[in-house]
């Protein structure tokens, strides 16, 4: 009787050790934290001039070569933050929904992919969606979440090959995103 219990205990320890290898990444300036299952984040910042003012897009990403049967599961993790100017009005629910829907459509188009599904997935009281895009002739999957919180659009993405499309690290990354409480001066 002892051997099955020990094997089960070993299995549980193995599963939890895989999950705890994730590194917490915190950005106090942007006010978020997220757990990155593997790799380290690089950062890229773009500025776009619009009629409303300057839009700043900051992208945190970790990338590695696309996996084969012998390599790891996910080859791309990303958190994009699009900061809109002060005069940008996000109080209208229809506008927020339109921004999120258009962002998913644009991402799907840019990847030459097909939107497999999307569903409402709010971040507390902030409207959001979860989505899955199939691309690379059906051989690759991108799963993501998108939220508009105050004047920032957060886009979380994980990419993998079809074989690993239901892996735990994908959901762990997406579900670990957290907005930090603002500190008072």
Image (cartoon, rainbow, N blue to C red):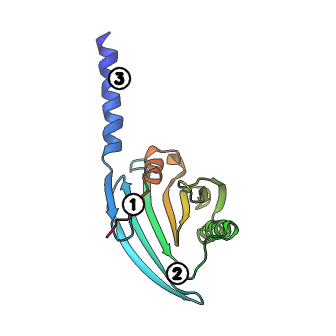
- Which numbered dot is residue 165? none
Q: Is residue 168 above or below residue 35?
A: above
Q: Which residue is mark 2?
A: 86
Would you say 17 lies left or right of 103 here?
left
Displayed quadrant of residue 144: bottom right
Percent x, y of residue 35: 37, 54
Q: What whole-number distance in Å separates the C-alpha atoms at marks 3 and 2?
A: 55 Å
Q: Quadrant of the C terminus?
A: bottom left
**Which badge, 2 or 1, comes first in the chain's sequence?**
2
Q: Which residue is mark 3?
A: 8
Would you say 107 lies left or right of 5 here?
right
Tell me, yes or no, whether the two marked residues, 3 and 2, touch with CB atoms within 8 Å.
Answer: no
- Which numbered dot is residue 181? 1
Kindly identify the residue that appears in the image at 47 percent across and 70 percent down: 81
Direction right: furthest residue: 94
* Crowding near the residue tagged with mark 1, few <14, some 14–19, many ≥20 C-alpha atoms within 10 Å: few
Percent x, y of residue 155: 51, 64
SS for callout 2? loop
**Closer to the camera in the image, 173 or 142:** 173
Q: Is residue 67 visible?
A: no
Q: Is residue 84 above or below residue 178?
A: below
Q: Quadrant of the N terminus?
A: top left
* Crowding near the residue tagged with mark 3, few <14, some 14–19, many ≥20 C-alpha atoms within 10 Å: few
Q: Is residue 53 visible?
A: yes
**Which badge, 3 or 2, comes first in the chain's sequence?**
3
Q: Is residue 52 above or below residue 163?
A: below
Q: What whole-number distance in Å separates the C-alpha atoms at marks 2 and 1?
A: 20 Å
SS for callout 1? loop
SS for callout 3? helix
Tell me, yes or no, whether the two marked residues, 1 and 3, touch with CB atoms within 8 Å.
Answer: no
Tell me, yes or no, whether the two marked residues, 2 and 1, touch with CB atoms within 8 Å.
Answer: no
């Amino acid at each position: 009787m002892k051997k099955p219990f020990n094997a089960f205990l070993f299995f549980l320890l193995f599963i939890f050790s895989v999950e705890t290898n994730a590194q917490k990444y915190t950005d106090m300036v942007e006010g978020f934290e997220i757990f990155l299952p593997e790799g380290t984040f690089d950062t890229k910042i773009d500025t776009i001039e619009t009629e409303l003012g300057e839009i700043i897009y900051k992208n945190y990403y970790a990338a590695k070569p696309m996996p084969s049967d012998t390599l790891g599961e996910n080859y791309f993790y990303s958190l994009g933050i699009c900061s809109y100017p002060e005069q940008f009005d996000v109080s209208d629910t229809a506008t927020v929904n339109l921004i999120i829907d258009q962002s998913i459509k644009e991402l799907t188009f840019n990847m030459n992919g097909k939107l497999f599904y999307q569903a409402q997935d709010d971040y507390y009281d902030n409207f959001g969606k979860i989505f899955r895009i199939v691309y690379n002739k059906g051989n690759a999957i991108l799963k993501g979440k998108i939220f508009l919180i105050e004047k920032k659009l957060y886009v979380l993405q994980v990419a993998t090959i079809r074989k690993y499309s239901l892996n735990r690290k994908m959901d762990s990354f997406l579900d670990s995103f957290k907005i930090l409480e603002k500190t008072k001066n």
